[in-house]
Structure formats: structure tokens, C-alpha cells
């Protein structure tokens, strides 16, 4: 089943601002930088064996692809309102404290849309295995997440805005 191109993407204010900033940077600064690199590479002569030219053209293709992706995302984006972030159950925008049942270790995560997820910042996608398992659940609920290393059991300790 193909994904629809017009699927609504709900973003936090911070996430929306980051995507808008990235798009602006790519369209202005990065496009100009790579165009200059291509121009310089062409000035070196024979482009058929010019690795600098190939590298710059690949970077240009990546930048243009990213611009298209960001524009589509922003076209379908809707800013999440504070009223939509609940504190009684896990939903987009909530901060959740999970206790890993085996080790007792606690993990703090914020549930966000997939385009905003960044594990190193504790932001997990609502489409990730953990995100899917905890979505809509309340404090005290135990969930099981299938991971490559096996089933991981978590207990939801805290849900907050």
C-alpha cells in the first residue's frame, strides 16, 4: 500500500521552526555554495574524470531532494496546539518517563511526529515500535516492545505536557 502524499503531519512549534530554518538554509546558503563548487570544478577542466565535480553534483542532487521533501512536509504540516498535548495519556507532544522492567532504568522521551524524531535528544516517533506501544496509554500501564534483542517490557511512570 503506497503512502498518501497529502497525509497531515502534526508538528510541535519547535519542530516546525527547525524544518522552516533548514529549508531556508538549503534554498539560500547551501544552494549557492554547491553551485559555486560546481563552477570551480568546471574551471579545473575535463569534468569526465573530475571527482570534485562529481562530488558537488551529488551534493546538489541531495540538497534538491531534501528541499522537495521539506516543502512537501511543510505543505502538509499542522501546528500542534497546547490543548492537543494531554497529560492523562501518552499523545503527540507528551513527555513520558518509562521504566525498563528488567533493569529498573528510567528513560525520558518526548513523543513527536516522525519528521521531528531525534533519539539522541530523547524525541521518539509516534511510528516507532516504542511510540506505537505507548501511544494512548496512561501512567501505570505496562507495554511490551519487540526489539532486535527480544521483547523489552516498559512501565509508563509519568506523562506530562
Image: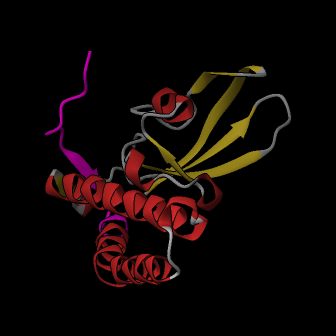
Residue in the image at 32% along x and 53% along y: 85
Image height of 119 relative to 135, above or below = below
Q: Quadrant of residue 88?
A: top left
Image height of 149 relative to 47, above or below = above
Q: Is residue 60 magenta?
A: no
Asked whether the viewer can see residue 79, the reply is no
Asked whether the viewer can see residue 94, the reply is yes
Residue in the image at 72% along x and 22% along y: 148
Count of numbered marks: 0
Residue in the image at 37% along x and 72% along y: 22
Quadrant of the image containing the C terminus: bottom left
Image height of 144 relative to 96, above or below = above
Q: Is residue 5 magenta?
A: yes
Closer to us: 93 or 29: 29
Closer to us: 96 or 53: 53
Q: Position of residue 141 (x, y in %)?
A: 55, 28
Q: Position of residue 103 (x, y in %)?
A: 86, 35
Q: Is residue 116 left or right of residue 107?
A: left
Q: Position of residue 160 (x, y in %)?
A: 46, 55
Image height of 29 relative to 150, above or below = below
Closer to us: 92 or 39: 39
Specify start and end residues of the magenta stretch as a single range: 1-16
Quadrant of the image containing the N terminus: top left
Q: Is residue 140 left or right of residue 147?
A: left
Q: Quadrant of residue 17?
A: bottom left
Q: Residue reaching furthest right?
A: 103
Q: Quadrant of residue 147?
A: top right
State the scheme by which the image is colored.
Answer: secondary structure
Residue in the image at 74% along x and 47% along y: 106
Amino acid at each position: 500500500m503506497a503512502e498518501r502524499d497529502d497525509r497531515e503531519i502534526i508538528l510541535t512549534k519547535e519542530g516546525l521552526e527547525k524544518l522552516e530554518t533548514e529549508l531556508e538554509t538549503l534554498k539560500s546558503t547551501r544552494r549557492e555554495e554547491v553551485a559555486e563548487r560546481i563552477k570551480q570544478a568546471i574551471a579545473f577542466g575535463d569534468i569526465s574524470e573530475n571527482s570534485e565535480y562529481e562530488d558537488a553534483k551529488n551534493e546538489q542532487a541531495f540538497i534538491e531532494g531534501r528541499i522537495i521533501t521539506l516543502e512537501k512536509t511543510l505543505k502538509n504540516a499542522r501546528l500542534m496546539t497546547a490543548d492537543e498535548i494531554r497529560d492523562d495519556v501518552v499523545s503527540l507532544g507528551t513527555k513520558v518517563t518509562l521504566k525498563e522492567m528488567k533493569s529498573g532504568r528510567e528513560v525520558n522521551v518526548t513523543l513527536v511526529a516522525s519528521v521531528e524524531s531525534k533519539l539522541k535528544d530523547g524525541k521518539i516517533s509516534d511510528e516507532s515500535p516504542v511510540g506505537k506501544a505507548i501511544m494512548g496509554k496512561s501512567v501505570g500501564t505496562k507495554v511490551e516492545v519487540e526489539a532486535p534483542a527480544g521483547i523489552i517490557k516498559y512501565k509508563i511512570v509519568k506523562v506530562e505536557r
